[in-house]
Image (cartoon, grey):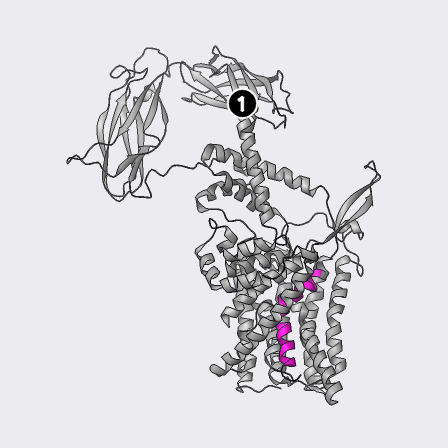
């Protein structure tokens, strides 16, 4: 039975894709626009209203198994009532309202909230959620006890289209005046309903949305291009990241998320690309808003430890500056990788412009790391004299010595095996100048950093003013011109001027601007290089890389379209783990693929959604769901017999799968109408439905539903819960989640006890 449930989950994915294809259909309409030369502009408008689609086809898609189970049970039971179908419908509604709502409340991140956007539609569906089962109590217990008449059955069935009509009226704001919202709150959930204006433009899809998407993809690809160029990120993985971010940033309806969740059960290709853990830092970086990134740099480093089998030793910095008056400099050494073993490295100094004994005391010693010791430091003496001389430097180098037996240690050197020590003569405030008279800035860099150095002393706090000047580049168009002041602290010898470079989108570019140093303060004076020219050039190699990433991204996004598959693509996806994306497959994907392989191949014969607007897929998959439901019904009955469990208990526990509340009228109204008409025509009698277990279960569920919806309303209007239906402060949301699950357990226990005769029903 569980294996058949997996089959139904795979089949439901196909069914949902057909509904997505049907409900996403758009039509072109002309809207008057004086700004257009033609006098109008063309907009794409969705044919299906979101609320109507949600309550009709989506409800059918989520509840097709139990609707068909109830119909099949009645048909194959000589049009007599059974316990499995109706109890499954009520049990499914209970699980969805109580357990799923409780999970949704708790799963929102701490401190965040999600509020229902369209309260009118929510009010209609919430009322009908309660009224549906109150109506069942009236039919089964009050009006005609234990009998369903044709009038009652037809009324039950007609309440379904009535629900859709009332919800549509509420959505469009025809019955009550809708207040204009100053802005749309980002924490809202549900369908995006632009019903404020009351015309066809209110639900139109912006015609420029494709251009905006292309511009955003280009921006992402350029940003990731830097990581491909500088950090070793593979272009294919960069395209996966761009496709994932674009997919996550887009607005999706409930159906899309349901399809993506369902695909987890079968090891099928997900609608959200997976990012490898190796590059998660880079993806997190592009997820961070630009204004919050600052100078965040993500560096992909080589694994010198060879998977943690070697100890890696290196300096903590590639360069260290020290004032001559400090008389010694501290050199930091760190170890990572395999740190659970002792190891030894050798440190020696090498002359640069600074000479041993005259400017520093030479150092040549071994440094030993104990087990689990990760940081060591050594001190090198600096010779302090009273004579002025320019800044000088020397080097410190790491070696891995041989052991006493002549064998090599399990130690390797990291990237920073040599560090430079700069001795700063601090007897003077120094001179300030540019490091180079000219700089080449590639447009792909987005920013150019121009270094200003302090030489001939570093005593005290000094500053220098700077400003930019156009040459062939224009400030505001080609670069962000500015002016400012650089401030050097005592002992600080280098600062940078950061200039933003704009993307001009020109095929060829060779434009320049100038940066000039001005007045100095703090006793410092200008050096020789007081002006530098920055030339902006096109990076052809980078542009080609960006184009490749963009093409790969678009290909990935096209492959994620749920309704554009073909027959060959369906079989390729069915035969391969994770739809053929083996790199993004998890262990669970492999397990579920082999468990559902038969179902995936079998259902690949169903026509793809791209044909005839998705209707062949819809009808054929619905028929197959009916066949699968009949098998599940028999298996459920056999299962109940084997463990001596009444069908009513089996239905509300094991068979109550993935249904939604608004379709209850259709779920019971359809089979009851068939049965009532059959008995009236064939036998002249009435359709009898024993209200015992079903009636008691409905009463218990109705009471629990009233409490649950009341709690949701209370959460929205109470500050302690965050004034929202979902999420909010941690402790209150956990308490609410526990209450919802306990209500469901109470419903299950009470219904089971009544079914077993422990407590008396109706």
Q: Residue at x 62, y 19 (%)?
A: 473
Q: In which image quadrant can residue 637 be found?
A: bottom right
Whether residue 561 is visible, yes or no, is yes
Q: Is residue 375 above or below residue 605?
A: above
Between 335 and 224, the one nearer to me in the picture: 224
Residue 64 is covered by the magenta coloring: yes
Q: Residue 218 placed where, x, y %? A: 60, 36
Q: In which image quadrant can residue 212 be found?
A: top right
Q: Residue 608 placed where, x, y %? A: 63, 57
Image quadrant occupied by the C terminus: bottom right
In this figure, which residue is indicated by the disc labeled 1? 441
Between 703 and 281, the one nearer to me in the picture: 281
Q: Say few, some or many: other residues with alpha carbon within 10 Å of mark 1 (under 14 / 14 to 19 / 20 or more).
A: many
Q: Is residue 320 above or below residue 414?
A: above
Q: Residue 5 placed where, x, y %? A: 53, 69
Q: Is residue 196 above or below residue 534?
A: below
Q: Residue at x 64, y 41 (%)?
A: 213
Q: Along the horizontal axis of the image, is 123 left or right of 175?
A: left
Residue 231 is covered by the magenta coloring: no
Q: Along the horizontal axis of the image, is 602 left or right of 426?
A: right
Q: Main structural element of the magenta stretch: helix, strand or loop? A: helix
| Residues in magenta, as a range | 53-82
Q: Residue at x 37, y 25 (%)?
A: 319
Q: Residue 531 placed where, x, y %? A: 53, 13
Q: Along the horizontal axis of the image, is 350 left or right of 755?
A: left
Secondary element type, mark 1: strand
Between 227 and 720, the one nearer to me in the picture: 227
Whether residue 102 is visible, yes or no, is no
Between 15 and 580, the one nearer to me in the picture: 580
């Amino acid at each position: 039975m569980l294996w058949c449930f997996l089959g139904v989950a795979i089949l439901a994915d196909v069914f949902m894709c057909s509904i997505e294809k049907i409900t996403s259909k758009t039509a072109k309409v002309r809207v008057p626009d004086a700004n257009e030369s033609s006098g109008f502009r063309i907009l794409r408008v969705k044919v299906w209203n979101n609320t109507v689609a949600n309550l009709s086809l989506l409800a059918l898609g989520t509840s097709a198994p139990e609707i068909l189970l109830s119909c099949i049970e009645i048909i194959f039971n000589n049009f007599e009532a059974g316990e499995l179908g109706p109890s499954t419908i009520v049990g499914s509604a209970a699980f969805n309202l109580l357990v799923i709502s409780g999970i949704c409340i708790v799963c929102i991140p701490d401190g965040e909230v999600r509020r229902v956007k369209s309260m009118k539609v929510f009010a209609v569906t919430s009322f009908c959620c309660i009224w549906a089962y109150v109506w069942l109590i009236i039919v089964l217990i009050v009006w005609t006890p234990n009998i369903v008449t044709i009038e009652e059955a037809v009324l039950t069935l007609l309440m379904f289209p009535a629900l859709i009509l009332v919800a549509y009226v509420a959505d469009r704001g025809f019955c009550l005046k809708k207040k204009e919202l100053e802005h749309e709150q980002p924490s809202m959930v549900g369908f995006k309903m632009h019903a404020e204006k009351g015309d066809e433009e209110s639900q139109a899809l912006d015609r420029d949305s494709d251009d905006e998407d292309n511009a955003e993809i280009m921006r992402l690809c350029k940003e990731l291009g830097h990581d491909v160029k500088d950090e070793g990120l593979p272009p294919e993985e960069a395209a996966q990241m761009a496709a994932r971010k674009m997919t996550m940033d887009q607005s999706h309806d409930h159906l899309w998320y349901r399809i993506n969740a369902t695909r987890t059960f079968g090891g099928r290709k997900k609608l959200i690309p997976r990012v490898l853990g190796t590059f998660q830092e880079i993806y997190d970086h592009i997820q961070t808003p630009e204004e919050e990134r600052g100078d965040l740099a993500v560096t992909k480093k080589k694994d010198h430890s060879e998977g943690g089998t070697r100890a890696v030793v290196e300096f903590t910095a590639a360069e260290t500056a020290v004032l001559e008056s400090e008389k010694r400099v501290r050199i930091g050494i760190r170890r990572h990788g395999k740190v659970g073993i002792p190891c030894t490295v050798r440190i020696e100094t090498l002359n640069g412009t600074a000479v041993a004994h005259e400017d520093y005391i030479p150092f040549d010693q071994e440094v030993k790391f104990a087990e689990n010791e990760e940081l060591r430091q050594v001190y090198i003496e600096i010779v302090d004299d009273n004579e002025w001389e320019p800044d000088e430097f020397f080097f410190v180098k790491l070696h891995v010595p041989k052991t006493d037996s002549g064998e090599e240690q399990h130690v390797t050197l990291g990237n920073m095996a040599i560090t430079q020590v700069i001795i700063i003569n601090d007897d003077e405030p120094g001179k300030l100048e540019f490091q180079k008279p000219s700089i080449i800035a590639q447009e792909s860099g987005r920013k150019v950093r121009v270094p200003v150095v302090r030489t001939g002393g570093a005593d005290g706090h000094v500053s220098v003013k700077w400003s930019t000047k156009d040459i062939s580049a224009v400030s505001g168009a080609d670069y962000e011109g500015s002016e400012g002041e650089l401030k050097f602290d005592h002992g600080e010898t280098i600062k940078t001027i950061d200039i933003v470079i704009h993307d001009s989108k020109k095929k060829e570019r060779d434009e320049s601007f100038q940066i000039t140093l001005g007045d100095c303060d703090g006793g410092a004076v200008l050096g020789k290089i007081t002006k530098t020219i920055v030339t902006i050039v096109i990076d052809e190699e980078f542009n080609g890389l960006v184009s490749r990433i963009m093409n790969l991204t678009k290909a990935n996004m096209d492959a994620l379209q749920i309704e554009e598959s073909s027959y060959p693509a369906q079989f390729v996806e069915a035969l391969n783990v994770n739809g053929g994306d083996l790199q993004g497959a998890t262990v669970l994907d492999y397990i579920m693929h082999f468990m559902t392989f038969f179902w995936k191949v079998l259902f690949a014969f169903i026509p793809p959604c791209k044909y005839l607007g998705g209707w062949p897929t819809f009808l054929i998959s619905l028929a197959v769901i009916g066949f699968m439901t009949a098998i599940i019904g028999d298996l459920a009955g056999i299962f109940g017999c084997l463990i001596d469990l009444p069908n009513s208990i089996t239905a509300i526990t094991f068979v109550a799968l993935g249904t939604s509340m608004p379709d209850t009228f259709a779920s019971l109204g359809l089979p009851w109408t068939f049965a009532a008409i059959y008995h009236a025509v064939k036998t002249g009698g009435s359709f009898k439905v024993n209200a015992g277990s079903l009636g008691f279960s409905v009463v218990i569920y109705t009471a629990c539903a009233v409490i649950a919806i009341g709690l949701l309303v209370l959460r929205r209007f109470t500050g302690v819960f965050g004034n929202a239906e979902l999420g909010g402060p941690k402790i209150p949301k956990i308490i609410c989640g526990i209450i919802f699950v306990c209500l469901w357990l109470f419903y299950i226990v009470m219904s089971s006890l009544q079914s077993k005769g422990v407590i008396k029903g109706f």
